[in-house]
Image (cartoon, rainbow, N blue to C red):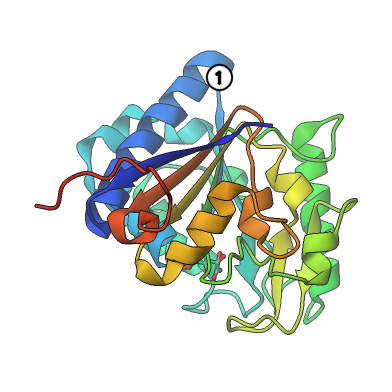
Amino acid sequence: MSRPELVVHRDGDLLAAATAARLVTALVDAQAARGSASLVLTGGRTGIAVLEHLRAIPARDAVDWTRVDLYWGDERFLPAGHPERNETQAREALLDHVPVPASRVHVMEPSDGRFGDDPEAAAEAYAAVLAAAEGDGAVPSFDVCLLGVGEEGHVASIFPESPAVAERERPVVAVRDCPKPPPTRVSLTLPAIRAAREVWLMTTGAAKAAAVASGVAGEDESRLPAAGARGLHRTLWLLDSAAAAKVPDAHTPPSA
Ligand SMILES: O=C(O)[C@H](O)[C@@H](O)[C@H](O)[C@H](O)COP(=O)(O)O
């Protein structure tokens, strides 16, 4: 597994713009190397801001969107089309604006979907989607897994000291009683995230600085799940200066 690397941008807007540009390159490179690319999306303000920037830049057309598979790191277990679903927000920010085929958009089931109000069944179904995509393994080697980071160090819907953070076998679990609303969610687990070639943790603001410093320093993942989110080849912490403020020796750009 890779060691954390830090990239610090002056502010949140630049971070989102630079990460969108980085994503274009990563997807184009993956398509050149393997024919198609796979990307795990995240919910949260930073993750959605990156998709909005991606929609706005001409370089987005360098990606062959017909050969991108999209997955989610977690989903808020709500009815289809609910404005708080990560899927709904990602569609509005980017997916409705690029020619990605519906068959390559691998959503987690909503709470009024095939399994009704049963997040465990939705989690199992998503594990089956991942297994089918991989062929012989349980989880695809995603090219990039995007993750936001919570103030207490959660990633996806893996919260500190929760059953999800302790999960070692299943790639996808239902999460109940989440401290961040809505309380019921479906989430990839750390072993599934660690199947990604590259994991990009993206966050901004002083409220995240303590979690970032502990995550980069390699805190115990049960106390700080972000510390356990590592890519096979690369683990990137993409930050603004405020979020990086407590990391010793971070190379922070001068303010404007
Ligand atoms: O669905 C969600 O809420 C998430 O996927 C969650 O893990 C999010 O990424 C973080 O809480 C950071 O969110 P912000 O970027 O809004 O701080």
Asked which secondary structure carries label 1, the reply is: loop
**Tally of marks:** 1
Viewer-proximal residue among 228 and 133 = 228
Residue farthest to the front, as pictured:
248
At horizontal 21% and vertical 37% (from top left) the residue drawn is: 58
On screen, residue 202 versus residue 117, left or right, reads left
From this viewpoint, is residue 160 visible?
A: yes
Using the image, determine if residue 145 lies above or below residue 198.
below
Q: Mark 1 points at which residue?
A: 35
At horizontal 35% and vertical 57% (from top left) the residue drawn is: 245
Using the image, determine if residue 120 lies above or below residue 27.
below
Whether label 1 lies within 8 Å of ligand 1 gets the answer no
On screen, residue 207 versus residue 114, left or right, reads left
Residue farthest to the left, as pictured:
256
Residue farthest to the top, as pictured:
33
Q: How crowded is mark 1: few (under 14 residues within 10 Å), some or many (20 or more)?
A: few
Q: Quadrant of residue 206?
A: bottom left
Viewer-proximal residue among 62 and 39 = 39
Using the image, determine if residue 236 lies above or below residue 207.
above
Q: Where is residue 102 in the image (x, y as percent from the top left)?
A: 55, 49
Q: Position of residue 171 (x, y in %)?
A: 81, 51
Q: Quadrant of residue 178?
A: bottom right
